[in-house]
Image (spheres, rainbow, N blue to C red):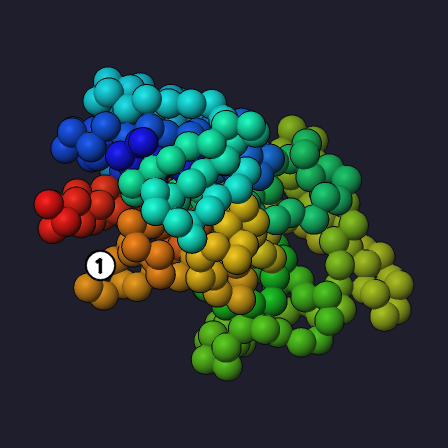
Amino acid sequence: MENLVIIGSGPAGHTAAIYAARANLHPIMFEGFMAGGVAAGGQLTTTSKVENFPGFPNGIDGLELMMNMRQQSMNSWTRIETKTIDKVDFSTKPLRLFSGNEVIEAKSVIIATGAIAKRLGIPGEKDYRQKWISACAICDGGLPIFRGKPVIIIGWGDVAMEEAQHMSHFASKVIILVRTDKLRASEVMQARAKANEKIEFMRYTEALEALGKDMLTGLKVVNNQTKEEKIIECSGLFYAIWHRPNTEFLWWQITLDNDGYIITKKMPVHTATNIDWVFAAGDVADKKYRQAITSAASGCMAALEVQKHLQEQK
Ligand SMILES: Cc1cc2nc3c(=O)[nH]c(=O)nc-3n(C[C@H](O)[C@H](O)[C@H](O)COP(=O)(O)OP(=O)(O)OC[C@H]3O[C@@H](n4cnc5c(N)ncnc54)[C@H](O)[C@@H]3O)c2cc1C
């Protein structure tokens, strides 16, 4: 039986692995094989430069950062399997996990399977990914290319409002595209956005195509009421539509919220779930912050909380 299984290989999973291995918990990590459509290493493997992770004054390539974390996990004696966990059975002890035909029995589990940022799949989207179409204005918004230039945010919820406020510090104008005339954002967030002179709402408007040369320069849009098409100049396009947590393999086994995120108890143990010996860390349990550093921090907490739980049981 495994002492501790870590599912997922982003900053949360690797930080949990490093802490757990150094505490002699002998963790094994299932890093996933294109699980949720993302390579082992997680969301940061899809970005070029990470400029807000402390310790890298000139930024670091996302893939390189994750390869470093993987190496550090292995140097701490974490065993890593490049396999996806397809199913779990948390109704029994030991806990049971399934990967293909393999059954893994575990005393404790940390779930760190992250989330996927949804995109629209419009023409040009792949060409200008990181040139500059992004799903994280908080991560990329400070880049000099947006200073004094218009940017577009697509979304209708609190995240869109928050990202628009953030971008208004740098951009000349922030246009929020909304498909209908309804916003899902809370009243207070809407009111703040509406009061910001730099933020403009474009309702009943949908994106058709990302345009540019070497970098994104504009977005072709259509008014879905009048069918009028036009091109809006912009240096950045940020999706704030939806994140999907990687929790399908957990359905009916653990308490999730309405959006599919794992609910953790927060107090007194931050990463504990409703199942004894099962903990959750990173974006899979966090729809608010969704940053590499907050994921890493909760991975650390999960490992320490597993360690404490083991000591208490002894
Ligand atoms: C384009 C982009 C740019 C970003 N830039 C920044 C930035 O500059 N700074 C910043 O702080 N944050 C950035 N973020 C956010 C950051 O990447 C995430 O907050 C962070 O990666 C979340 O870490 P995590 O460990 O929770 O999960 P993830 O990074 O999502 O990793 C989870 C991993 O688990 C694997 N997995 C899923 N299901 C299973 C399963 N069933 N079995 C096994 N493995 C599984 C997945 O394949 C994935 O590899 C960016 C995000 C994106 C999408």
Q: Residue 261 vs residue 57: left or right?
A: right
Q: Position of residue 141 (x, y in %)?
A: 45, 48
Q: Position of residue 229 (x, y in %)?
A: 84, 57
Q: Residue 239 vs residue 13: left or right?
A: right
Relative height, residue 236 to residue 187 (above, below): above
Q: Is mark 1 within 8 Å of ligand 1?
A: no
Badge 1, how many Cα within 10 Å: few under 14, some, many 20+? some
Residue drawn at x 64%, y 47% is 119
Relative height, residue 121 to residue 182 (above, below): above
Q: Position of residue 188 (x, y in %)?
A: 45, 80
Residue drawn at x 47%, y 74% is 189
Q: Secondary structure at mark 1?
A: loop
Residue under numbered circle 1: 269
The reply to whether residue 78 is visible in this rendering is yes
Q: Position of residue 125 (x, y in %)?
A: 69, 39
Q: Residue 199 vs residue 181: left or right?
A: left
Residue drawn at x 26%, y 34% is 3
Closest to the observer, 87 or 48: 87
The reply to whether residue 175 is visible in this rendering is no
Relative height, residue 174 to residue 3 (above, below): below
**Amino acid found under the numbered disc labelled 1:** Val
